Amino acid sequence: MTLREAVCRTAKKLGEAVGEPALEARLMAAKLLGKDRLGFFDMERTFPSELEEELRRMAERRISGEPLQYILGEWWFMGLPFYTESCALIPRQDTETLCEEALRLIAERGYKTLLDICTGTGCIAVALAKLSGIETEASDISEECVRLAERNAERNGVRAVFRTADLFGGAGKYDLVTANPPYISEADMAKLQREVTFEPATALSGGGDGLDFYRRIAKEAAPHINRGGALLLEVGYGEAEKVRGLFPGRTTRTIKDLNGIERIVVVEF
Ligand code: GLN
């Protein structure tokens, strides 16, 4: 079978199950061939028969609702490659908005030190370290995530310190603190998109109203952020005003993501 036939057959199988079957089929085949995801392919080359079964299994997982990013085992964030594992949230474009603002602040204010809490895959910490050179620490409550984040730092040639910790546990003091904590409310947890149910509930569930982690962060942050420093939080739909309200007496502002949703809350220290 040629690569073209393998991709077309897989795309047809994915059919209605996904938005862009041909693109996803191509990414799966590229992964199996060890090729760059969007690089040039000779579509008439032979697709090794021993990979056919694997490609079929990938398509079946996808049809069952599993996110493509877990099936591929890697995904791209801020133009950089990250390993994905089901212990951690998949890196999302919404979170690139946080990184873009962080990079702007680092350049403008000369921030030297970063702490990223709830780091998951480590995508925020690793991208900021890689793209700005800022001295970086990151933590996650899951040891599995810490190991994953370490692999992602290594993959991107970044040096950063990773710790297993609950929010600020064991942290020092930094110019910049970033977090994409779990923020989905109990009511919304009950009606997640099918694909999102494959992601860890511990990375999604923010308690009754979704704000549990912001309340803790608001209480614990001050000793860990230098004067003139900033806290950047990703927030869920409709949460920005409530999160700003948790920091009375501080200057706060919000930044919209590319869908026009208030996605990032910036708190000045
Ligand atoms: N953005 C994710 C979603 O809505 C949630 C991420 C989070 O809870 N931090 O699926």
Image (cartoon, rainbow, N blue to C red):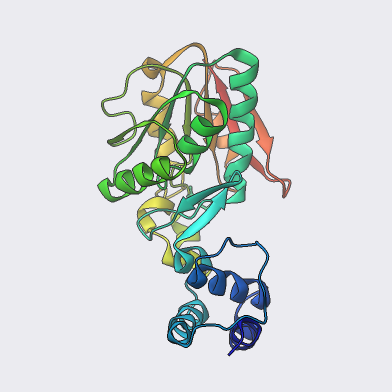
Residue 45's image quarter? bottom right
Q: Quadrant of residue 84?
A: bottom left
Question: What percent of the width, then of the height, locates residue 147?
Answer: 30, 46
Please, which residue is most extreme toward the top here?
227
Judge left or right: residue 249 versus residue 71. Answer: right
Q: Is residue 42 left or right of residue 106?
A: right
172 left or right of 129 in image: left
Residue drawn 36% across the image and 15% down it: 223
Image spot of residue 198 (x, y percent)? 42, 67
**162 displayed left or right of 237:** left
Quarter where residue 160 is shown: top left
| Residue 241 in view in this figure | no
Q: Residue at x 45, y 64 (%)?
A: 70
Task: Please provide percent x and percent y for residue 96.
Answer: 61, 42
**72 or 259, which is in the foreground?**
72
Q: Residue at x 48, y 55 (%)?
A: 90
Q: Is residue 155 visible?
A: yes
